[in-house]
Amino acid sequence: MTTISLAMAAVVAVLYSVGFYLLLQRSLMRVLLGVVVLGHGANLLLQLAGGPPARPPILDGTGTEGMADPLPQALALTAVVITFAMTTYLLALGYRSWVLVGHDEVQDDLEDRRIARRRTVKASMGEEVSDHGEETEVDPGSAAASDDPVASVGENR
């Protein structure tokens, strides 16, 4: 069984951390960079899982301890193709956003803001709005009448 060095594990952790941080940003260019960095982290993790380099592939007459595992290599190749497809899609999306709006920042949906405001008003009046849009009476002291963190989206803007 092979072990992964601590330095390489730290590099993978940093790549994943930076990738996820960039994915959570509002700019499409930062999201694109996050996908690319996350793809590189996934490729590195898959190559580390494959074992040390310079082992021969499956050959006749060799024992299993001397062979390289071809599965992580195939998965890394698939991850490269998926990352390339996502990169081209996000580049096209960012370009289209730049042409239409003049910037690449993802904005809040107006319908989501309206629903969040309606939920806040209903909760303050002691009513509850279910998923199906039916209104029911709620005791103001119950847990269902507590503030919904999603309901305050867009209130501070």
Image (cartoon, rainbow, N blue to C red):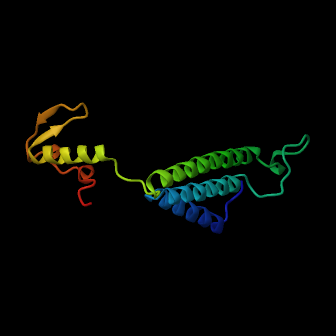
Name above or below for residue 143 compared with residue 5: above
Q: Quadrant of residue 38?
A: bottom right
Left or right, 117 with reference to 95: left
Q: Nearer the viewer, residue 11 or 80?
A: 80
Q: Is residue 58 left or right of residue 151?
A: right
Number of disc labels: 0
Residue 122 in the image: state x and y as whole percent: 14, 43
Q: Quadrant of residue 19?
A: bottom right
Quarter of the rendering occupied by the C terminus: bottom left
User: Residue 12 appears in which quarter of the rendering?
Assistant: bottom right
Please name the residue shown 86% across and 50% down the image: 56
Residue 138 rendering spot, x and y as whole percentages:
10, 39
| Of residues 37 and 30, the one drawn nearer to the viewer in this rendering | 30
Q: Residue at x 18, y 44 (%)?
A: 118
Height in image: 84 above or below 136?
A: below
The outermost residue toward the bottom is 7
Residue 18: percent from left, percent from top: 53, 63
- Outermost residue on the right side: it is 61
Place of residue 128 in the rendered image (x, y in percent of width and height, measured from the top left): 15, 39
Task: Please give left or right for residue 85 compared with residue 99 in the image.
Answer: right
The one nearer the camera, 18 or 102, is: 102
Give the residue at x 84% y 51%: 66
